[in-house]
């Protein structure tokens, strides 16, 4: 996981609010499969580990590591 507090958003950002790149992807939680490892290597997802709670972020920028959490 990345170290900063997640940025609150109402939907997945098209561009990262910090670096401006279009590298914001879904954070995938749970036991990673070989396929999930390939997706992470390709920059399609970020692996988030096995512990999930209401404060777990939903998306992350693969470029600058900023995380985003969906709020209502």
Image: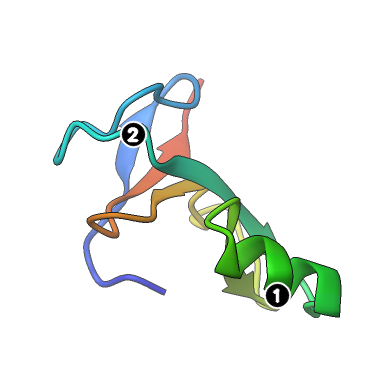
Q: Identify the coloring.
A: rainbow
Whether 49 is drawn above or below 40: the answer is below
Is residue 24 in view?
yes
Q: Residues within 10 Å of mark 2 (few under 14, many from 20)?
A: some
The nearer-to-camera label among 1 and 2 is: 1
Q: Secondary structure at mark 1?
A: helix
Image mark count: 2
Q: CA distance from mark 1 to mark 2?
A: 27 Å
Q: Residue furthest left?
A: 18
Q: Are marks 1 and 2 in contact (CB under 8 Å)?
A: no
Q: Earlier in the sequence, mark 1 or mark 2?
A: 2
Whole-percent x, y for residue 47 in the image: 60, 69
Whether 15 is drawn above or below 66: the answer is above
Q: Is residue 15 left or right of residue 38?
A: left
Quadrant of residue 62 within the rendered picture: bottom left
- Check residue 37 in the rendering and tell me which mark sits there, or answer none: 1
**Quarter of the picture holding the N terminus:** bottom left
- Identified at 40% across, 21% down, the residue is 14
Whole-percent x, y for residue 3 in the image: 25, 72
Q: Secondary structure at mark 2?
A: strand
- Reading the image, the residue beneath label 2 is 8
Quadrant of residue 36 within the rendered picture: bottom right
């Amino acid at each position: 996981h990345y170290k900063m507090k997640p940025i609150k958003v109402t939907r997945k950002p098209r561009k990262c609010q910090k670096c401006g790149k279009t590298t914001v992807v879904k954070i995938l939680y749970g036991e990673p499969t070989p396929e999930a490892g390939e997706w992470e290597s390709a920059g399609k997802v970020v692996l988030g580990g096995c512990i999930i709670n209401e404060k777990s972020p939903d998306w992350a920028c693969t470029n600058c590591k900023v995380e985003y959490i969906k709020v209502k």
